[in-house]
Image (cartoon, rainbow, N blue to C red):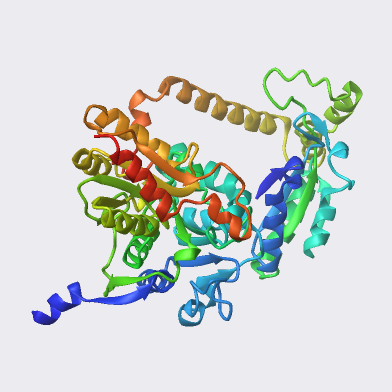
Amino acid sequence: MTFGDGATNTGSFHEGLNLAAVWKLPVIFVCQNNLYAELTPVEDTMNITEVRERALAYNIPGIRIDGNDPEAVFATVTEAANRARAGDGPTLIEAVTFRFKGHYFGDTMKYMPKEQLAEAELRDPMITYRRTLIAGGLLTEAELDEIDHAAVADVEEAVAAIAAAGSPGIEALENDLYADMRGVPA
Amino acid sequence: MTAVTESITATKTLGNLQAINEALDEALAADPRVFLIGEDLADPGGGVNGATRGLSTKHGPGRVLDTPISEAAIVGAAIGAAIEGQIPVAEIMIMDFIGIAMDQIVNHAAKARFMSNGRTTIPLTLRTATFGGLGSGATHSQSLESWFMHVPGLKVVMPSTPADMKGLLKASIFDPDPVIFIETVACYGVKGEVPTGADHVVPIGKADIKRPGTDATIITYGRGVFDSLQAAELLAADGIDAEVLDLRTLLPLDTESILESVGRTGRAVITHHAVEFAGPGAEVAAQINTHLFGSLRAPVERVGTRFRSIPAGKLESHVLPSPSKIASAVKKSMEYK
């Protein structure tokens, strides 16, 4: 289950973690902490420095990792999945990352210091992990380009399909509110 | 053949609380996907009022799940189970606390079918109860059914008698859409005849005439049915023959039955324990006005709870409807000739 840092300030987060802990449910809670909840930095909305500390209250493991490091993410999620499968209950993983774009289209991002953004962009895993893979001899530049092009093509295909589909017709308003639309207010 | 006929028509006397317990018991027995989730439901607690007593013992603790005091998690977990193909019956013990779960109800349970183009359905039954009429105070006594009538995607059921309670609870559990099923704690002890046999089901969306009459229609539901039947007795002593129409379901509303009855009597009094202002009666009055304007013999009257926080103790009776207030409203209606 994934969510942002901001969601961990809601009651539902705490109810959910507590219930999962009490029932030892096989859940992996993955918090993508990108340091901003909408327009507000996390330090203004939490009296703790690390979201993982919230796991302490529910007596479940809380693990903070570099969310920009795919290998760390893979290893930590694997461990949490093994715990869950073994019946040992949930894990809270805090994957620290950053938000390179605004919260919404047209967001001027006045709240985010330019230096902080510039520094974070240097740690963009799309760039740094590419270097790691090439340096380690795991993939070549050409192979990575191929992956990139395929991903872009997938997105473009999806966008084209949605654009071609057009908006639903007005008849869509008469369906799928209930299984049986008899007696439903007009 | 005689035995078969008897099994269909036979009844037994049950209280509302027993009717609820039997409906849950039969649903748990009928379908392994049915389970109960909420606070204090499992034995030995068996529900704060005893509605689920014995069910965890009979059907196993895996079918009756006790939760922390976490209303959002109760409804959220039930919705998740519904998405995965289970049939959850969740309970929010006291209706006043349902606000904590409102996001789950309004933005998830009610929206899933529409937002998924019909692919994701939520056959959730959410049982909850009003403690109104027991002097329990402002945060334990409200009738908040109109909140849910304002949410497309939900159904709202609020039965009065044991036969309706049992039959509608089973209909709600096996309905493919989310149903808010509202019980009245003050009426848990009300007894009535309930058809025996597991096939007793009352369809959602159908009102029922609880007392036929010719002079005026009292439209009501839940506890208001008993207030209205008493009012009808008071009125009978004065020679006024009032019909009592029990809506049973508020969404979808059985407008057809309302218009049929008021079309005959020409007079309508609507009563409920929800706040009168912008309450369910406002919608009923609007429907009557739109469709029967020319044939009404008197303005539509409403008798709801006053627009006040419900006080604790004896003062409560001053804000709630009562048989005498309902009878007075009918008499006022009768003054128009």
Can you say whether A142 is above or below B187 in the image? Answer: above
Give whichever of B216, B291 is nearer the camera. Answer: B216
Give whichever of B262, A93 is nearer the camera. Answer: B262
Tell me, yes or no, if residue B251 can be seen here. no
Can you say whether A96 is above or below A167 in the image? Answer: below
Locate residue B332, reporting x and y percent.
35, 40
Q: Quadrant of the C terminus of chain B?
A: top left
Q: Left or right of A6: which side holds B133?
A: left
Give whichever of A145, B232 is nearer the camera. Answer: B232
Locate residue B288, reporting x and y percent.
30, 34
Q: Quadrant of the rendered structure where residue B161 is?
A: bottom left
Q: Left or right of A176: which side holds B54?
A: right
Instruction: Give the residue displayed 78% in from the left and 28% down from the top.
Output: A39
Q: Residue furthest front?
A: B238
Q: Quadrant of the N terminus of chain B?
A: bottom left
Can you say whether A32 is above or below B71 in the image? Answer: above
Locate residue B65, reporting x and y percent.
56, 69
Q: Left or right of A65: which side holds B325?
A: left
Tell me, yes or no, if residue A79 can be seen here. yes
Q: Quadrant of the rendered structure where residue A114 is?
A: top right
